[in-house]
Amino acid sequence: MTELHEGLSKLREPFEANKIGKLPKPTRRENKVDWCKECNSRHGLPAVHIDYVGHAAVTDRLLDADLEWEWEPFALDEDGLPKFDADGGLWIWLTVCGKRRIGYGDAQGKRGPDGVKEAIGDAIRNSGMRFGVALDLWHKGDLHAPGPAAKSDAVEPAAPSPEELALAARRELKATIARLGISADAAAQRFLSDTDTHLGLSTDAAAIKALTRHYEEEAAKA
């Protein structure tokens, strides 16, 4: 196996359990903060938990594959700094072992220096996934398990989870406001005002769809 293939293959190796964290997402902003046994930390409860690999572990994996890996933004602003898009997201190129792939990151509503670092880390994780980094964690099932043989009495697929329904509703909202020329920040502030919950953390698909209908109805009246 060539050095190039060896490096790229390292990116796809599963992460050890001690490098996989639990990212808590409180269902509402006002949830009471308490000790969580699932992730051994204090945060608003109840909350959903997502398996994830943090920025440090992903960086360590990239260094294992290629000590000279690098990332670069799609564009620079007038000050020569990475340029963020209208939604506060950052498009980047990630280069590992001479191969370059696209990634996108956002700060999940964070502002200032912490928001910039969050967007960069998210973009590196996202583009790293294109190389296979923590791909099994991005996919909820087992990517490499053999599929069951078709049966006439096969069990019906499970209904979408609240998180999946909310994700689909957010995508519909994003497409609608983009078509109508409404900023993502304005939509997020409106949702926070209406529901007292951050749009990016909400699992209330009905509330997200209600905001989409509101914008569509307002546009129809114009």
Image (tube, grey):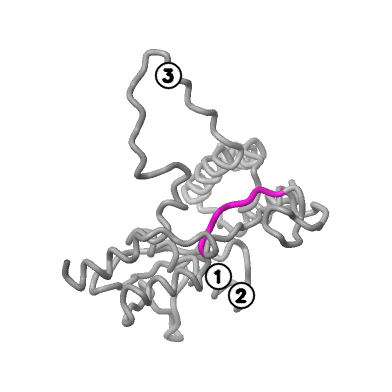
Image: 215 above or below 113: above
Crowding at label 2, few (<14), some or many (≥20) Cα neighbours within 10 Å? Answer: few
Image: 91 above or below 156: below
Task: Determine if residue 222 is in view.
Answer: no
Q: In terms of secondary structure, where does tag 2 sit?
A: helix
Task: Please identify the quadrant where the N terminus is shown.
Answer: bottom left
- Percent position of residue 28, x then y: 74, 50
Q: Nearer the viewer, mark 2 or mark 3?
A: 3
Q: In the rendered structure, which amino acid carries the disc numbered 1?
A: Glu
Q: Which mark is residue 114?
A: 2
Q: In the rendered structure, which amino acid carries the disc numbered 3?
A: Ala
- Percent position of residue 86, x then y: 49, 64
| Cβ atoms at labels 2 and 1 below 8 Å apart | yes
Q: How far apart are marks 2 and 3 (CA)?
A: 48 Å
Q: Residue furthest top?
A: 152
Sequence-first tag of 2 and 3:
2
Q: In the rendered structure, which amino acid carries the disc numbered 2?
A: Asp
Quadrant of the rendered image containing residue 183: bottom right
Sequence-first tag of 3 and 1:
1
Residue 5 as seen in the image, left or right of residue 54? left
Q: Which range is magenta?
A: 47-53
Q: Residue 177 versus residue 199: which sits nearer the camera? A: 199
Q: Distance between the residues labelled 2 and 1?
A: 6 Å
Q: Name the residue under label 1.
A: 118
